[in-house]
Each structure stands twice: as C-alpha cells, then as structure tokens.
Image (cartoon, grey):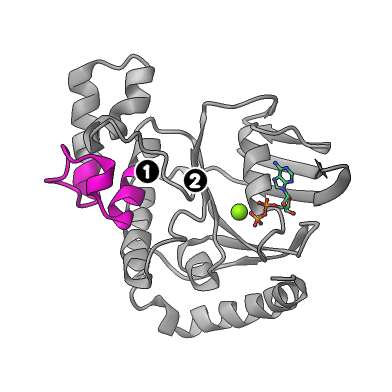
Amino acid sequence: MAQLLTVEGISKEFNVRGKKVLALDSLALGMDHGEFVTVVGPSGCGKSTLLNLVVGLLPPSAGRIVFRGRAVNGINPEIGYVTQKDNLLPWRTLIENVELSLEIRGVEKSVRRRRAEELIDRVGLNGFEEHYPHELSGGMRQRANIIRTLIYDPELILMDEPFGPLDAQTRIVLQDQLLKLWSANRKTILFITHDLIEAITLADRVIVMTSRPGRVKHIAAVPIPRPRDVYQIHTSREFQEVYERLWRELRPEVIMTEV
Ligand SMILES: Nc1ncnc2c1ncn2[C@@H]1O[C@H](COP(=O)(O)OP(=O)(O)O)[C@@H](O)[C@H]1O
Ligand SMILES: [Mg+2]
C-alpha cells in the first residue's frame, strides 16, 4: 500500500522584513498508515513550519506534499492539527468544545454528545463537562484540546509540542493517555517535541532535524514493544541505546543553535 503521507523535498523560504530566511531545505519523509512518528530538533529549525505545510496552511517554496495520493493544496480538513496553545473557545463548556467539530460537520446532537462523553471519560475529565476553559488546569485544557481533534477521527493527526508547557508529571500522564487512545484506533500521528525522552517513549520512529534550515538528519526506529510503560520505559536497556544514538545526532544541532 502507498504511504499515507510523503513529504517530497520541500523547502520553505520566508521573507522577513526584506530578508530571506530559509526555514526548511529539501526535507523529505514518509509515513505509513497507523505509524507514530516523532520529530525532534533545535528551536527554530522549522518544526512548526513543517506541520503548517503538511496541513496546507502554507505553500512550500519548492517540493510537494502528498496525502492519500493527492498533492496537498490548501487547508486539508481531513488532517487533524493539535497546536501547543489550546484553541478552546472560552465561551463554550468543555463538552461543547469537544463536540464542536462534529457540530460543524452536522452530526446529530445525541450522537456527538455520546462520542464526546466517551472521550472525556477516556482521559479522566469526567465531572468537568460543564466547566469553562478558564476553570480547567493546563493539563486538563490540553487533554480537551487533543480529544476535540480525535473526535472527528482524522486519518492523520499533527501535534506540535502539545505537552510543551506542562510540568513533568502531567506530561507523563498525558503521554500514557495518548498512547492508549492511539493504540485503540491506530491513527497516524506526526508529533513534534523538544524532549528526546518523550520522542522515544511515544514513537515507532524518531526523526532528528538539523538546525535551520531544517533537513532530516537522522531517523531511528524504536524497537521497544508495545504497550509501553511510560513510567518505566526510560530505565530499559533498549531505551538507553536509542537515546544515546539519537542524542549523538541531536546534540551538535542544539549546540549550534543560538538561543
Ligand atoms: N510565518 C512566518 N513568517 C516569517 N518567518 C517565519 C514564519 N514562520 C516561521 N518563521 C521562521 O522560520 C524559522 C523556523 O520557525 P519554526 O518553524 O517556528 O521553528 P520551530 O518550530 O522548529 O521552533 C524561524 O527562523 C522562524 O522565525
Ligand atoms: Mg515550533
């Protein structure tokens, strides 16, 4: 079967106050159906730009992106996009936010309620259905942000550092929940993170990007069986081997980047 997504030699140049900035340079990658791929790279190397191109928010300067056999050309509503900042609507309750995309698609109220309640339950947010976003913690809001994308069942889900602003313990709990949700329906996930431990914990394959202009520097398979125990995984021998290999690739890129 053809790959679900191929990114074929894309470059992206921005014009910043008359100066050209090359964000991505001939970047190529492919994803199979049901794969969980994570991307790590130094700050400013073009990770968010890559996702913006894949979802069709921005056109590439060169190269092309093919999703389900068709070149991406404009925003693709079949691709889910979870950004770092939750985009919950402040005037809607948690459950109303989770239901929103089904409402837009004209799904009947009782059906979308049921589906929202199911997902809310899966991520332990029951009891908070009628709360407004400002009444929820950061971790709760990010859970809601993720399930509001999962609810319409996109084949490909892009996630841009979704756990970035959360504390270390909350991150692990959310990683665990995400893996459970993913293994229940095996959608394809492209997940950006700056945290190498998180990248390995979640992924089938980890992609290391160079510093800007971003290219693929290295790809490592993560040969750790699933289901994984996110609370213990980093202590295993296999984990440490992958970690060392990836850190050798990532470290010089991080050091080269001005912070
Ligand atoms: N819309 C934009 N306009 C101009 N420059 C941008 C835009 N988006 C990103 N850039 C630039 O492209 C580079 C990569 O940015 P980004 O993709 O946000 O990196 P990352 O997500 O890896 O931190 C940076 O130099 C950034 O300033
Ligand atoms: Mg970014």
Quadrant location of residue 220? Answer: bottom right
The numbered disc on residue 251 is none
Whether residue 236 is visible, yes or no, is yes
As for residue 141 lying within the magenta part, the answer is yes
Rendering coords of residue 190 (x, y %): 55, 49
> Is 142 or 119 nearer to us in this picture?
142
Give the position of the C terminus as an image quadrant.
bottom right
Q: How many marks?
A: 2
Residue beneath disc 1: 145
Residue at the image point whose x is 66% and y is 63% from the top: 43
Q: Which residue is at the far front?
A: 17
In the image, residue 144 sits, relative to residue 199, either above or below, namely above
Report whether 226 appears left or right of 217: left
In the image, residue 253 sits, relative to residue 148, either above or below, namely below
Report whether 61 appears left or right of 43: right
Q: Which residue is at the far right?
A: 19
Rendering coords of residue 213 (x, y %): 81, 57
- Disc 2 element: loop
Range of residues picked out in magenta: 120-144
Rendering coords of residue 20 (x, y %): 87, 46
Task: State yes or no: Cβ of the residue under disc 2 lies below 8 Å from any atom of ligand 2.
Answer: no
Mark 1 to mark 2: distance in Å? 8 Å
Q: Residues within 10 Å of mark 2 (few under 14, many from 20)?
A: some
Residue kind at label 1, given as amino acid type:
Asn
Q: Residues within 10 Å of mark 1 (few under 14, many from 20)?
A: many
Residue beneath disc 2: 83
Q: Are marks 1 and 2 in contact (CB under 8 Å)?
A: yes
Rendering coords of residue 138 (x, y %): 33, 55
Give the position of the N terminus as an image quadrant.
top right
Residue at the image point whose x is 41% and y is 45% from the top: 86
Report whether 107 appears left or right of 211: left
The tag earlier along the polypeptide, 1 or 2, is 2
